[in-house]
Image: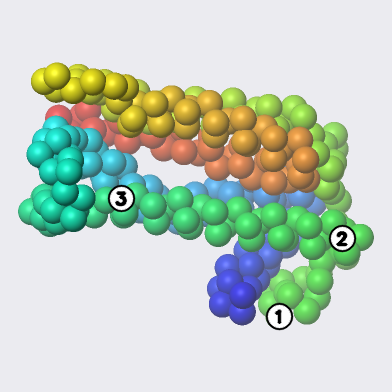
C-alpha cells in the first residue's frame, strides 16, 4: 500500500487539488474531468498495445481452434502448442490485460480520493499536499453548480453506463463473426462472452454509479467518452494508412 499511496494516490490527489485551485474555476467536477483527460492521455500507448494485442489474437483464432481440436484430449500438449504459436507470432495473450489493470488501479485511487475528501468535510488534507500545492480550504462539491459529487447521481450513472455500452459495442464491431469449422457443434464461447460483456459492463457501471459518489461516475463517464473518441481517431488513421 505504501507504493500505491506514494506513486499513485498522492500524485493524483495533488494533481486534482492543483487543477481545482488553478484551472477549474473552483469547480470540483471540472477538475475531475481534467484529471481524467490527463490520465487517459498518459494511457494512450497502453491502449494502443491492448488494441494491437486483440487484433493479433483475433487473426490467430483459426490456428487456435485447430490446436484446441487437435489436442482436445491432451491439455498439456495443447498448452505447449498454443505457447509455441504465440511465440512464433510474437504475441502475448496477456498483454491486453495490463491496460485494464492500470485502469482499475486509477479507479481505486480516484474512489479513495473522493471518499477521503468527502469524509474530511470537503477539506483537503495538508499532509498529503506537496509544498507547491496550496490547500484550497473547503472544497466546492458542486459540479456546474448543480450536481453534488459527494452523493450518487442517477443521471450521470446512466450516462456512464450508456457510454460504456457504446464503447464496448464499437470494440466488438471490429471483431468479425467466427464461422464454425467442420462438424464442430455447440455455441462459440468467445461470442457468448463478448455479448455478455456488452451488457454486463454497463449494468455493473450503473449499479456502481447509483451507490457511490457521483464524482466516481463522472470520472468513468469522462474516461469512457475519451476512449470512444480515441477509438474513432484510431479507426480513421488505420483507414488512411491502408
Q: Is residue 65 above or below residue 119?
A: above
Residue 188 location in percent, x, y? 30, 25
| Residue in view at x 80 percent, y 75 percent | 126
Front residue of this view, candidates 47 and 239: 47
| Residue in view at x 18 percent, y 55 percent | 76
Residue 160 visible to an observer of this rendering: no
Q: CA distance from mark 2 to mark 1?
A: 23 Å
Mark 1 nearby-residue class (10 Å; few <14, some 14–19, many ≥20):
few
* Quadrant housing the C terminus: top left
- Badge 2 is on which residue? 119
* Quadrant housing the N terminus: bottom right
Question: Horizontally, is 126 left or right of 58 in the view?
Answer: right
Front residue of this view, candidates 4 and 85: 85
Q: Mark 2 or mark 1: which comes first in sequence?
A: 2
Q: Mark 1 or mark 3: which comes first in sequence?
A: 3
Residue 68 location in percent, x, y? 17, 40
- Badge 3 is on which residue? 49
Secondary structure state at the residue bearing disc 3: helix
Secondary structure state at the residue bearing disc 1: loop
- Badge 1 is on which residue? 131
Q: Mark 3 or mark 2: which comes first in sequence?
A: 3
Question: Horizontally, is 113 left or right of 204 in the view?
Answer: right
User: Which-is-in-front pick, marks 1 and 3?
Assistant: 3
Mark 3 nearby-residue class (10 Å; few <14, some 14–19, many ≥20):
some
| Labels 1 and 3 touching (C-beta < 8 A) | no
Amino acid at each position: 500500500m505504501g507504493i500505491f499511496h506514494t506513486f499513485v494516490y498522492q500524485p493524483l490527489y495533488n494533481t486534482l487539488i492543483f487543477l481545482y485551485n488553478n484551472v477549474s474555476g473552483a469547480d470540483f467536477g471540472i477538475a475531475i474531468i481534467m484529471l481524467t483527460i490527463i490520465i487517459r492521455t498518459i494511457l494512450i500507448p497502453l491502449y494502443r498495445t491492448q488494441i494491437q494485442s486483440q487484433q493479433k489474437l483475433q487473426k490467430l483464432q483459426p490456428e487456435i481452434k485447430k490446436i484446441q481440436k487437435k489436442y482436445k484430449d491432451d491439455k498439456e500438449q495443447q498448452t505447449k502448442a498454443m505457447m509455441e504459436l504465440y511465440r512464433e507470432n510474437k504475441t502475448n495473450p496477456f498483454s491486453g490485460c495490463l491496460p485494464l489493470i492500470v485502469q482499475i488501479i486509477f479507479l481505486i485511487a480516484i474512489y479513495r480520493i473522493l471518499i477521503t475528501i468527502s469524509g474530511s468535510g470537503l477539506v483537503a488534507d495538508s499532509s498529503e499536499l506537496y509544498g507547491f500545492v496550496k490547500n484550497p480550504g473547503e472544497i466546492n462539491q458542486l459540479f456546474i453548480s448543480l450536481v453534488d459529487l459527494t452523493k450518487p447521481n442517477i443521471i450521470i450513472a446512466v450516462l456512464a453506463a450508456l457510454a460504456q455500452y457504446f464503447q464496448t459495442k464499437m470494440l466488438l464491431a471490429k471483431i468479425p463473426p467466427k464461422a464454425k469449422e467442420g462438424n464442430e457443434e455447440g455455441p462459440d464461447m468467445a461470442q457468448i462472452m463478448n455479448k455478455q460483456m456488452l451488457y454486463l459492463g454497463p449494468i455493473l457501471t450503473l449499479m456502481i454509479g447509483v451507490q457511490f459518489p457521483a464524482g466516481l461516475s463522472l470520472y468513468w463517464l469522462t474516461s469512457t467518452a475519451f476512449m470512444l473518441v480515441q477509438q474513432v481517431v484510431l479507426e480513421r488513421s488505420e483507414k488512411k494508412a491502408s
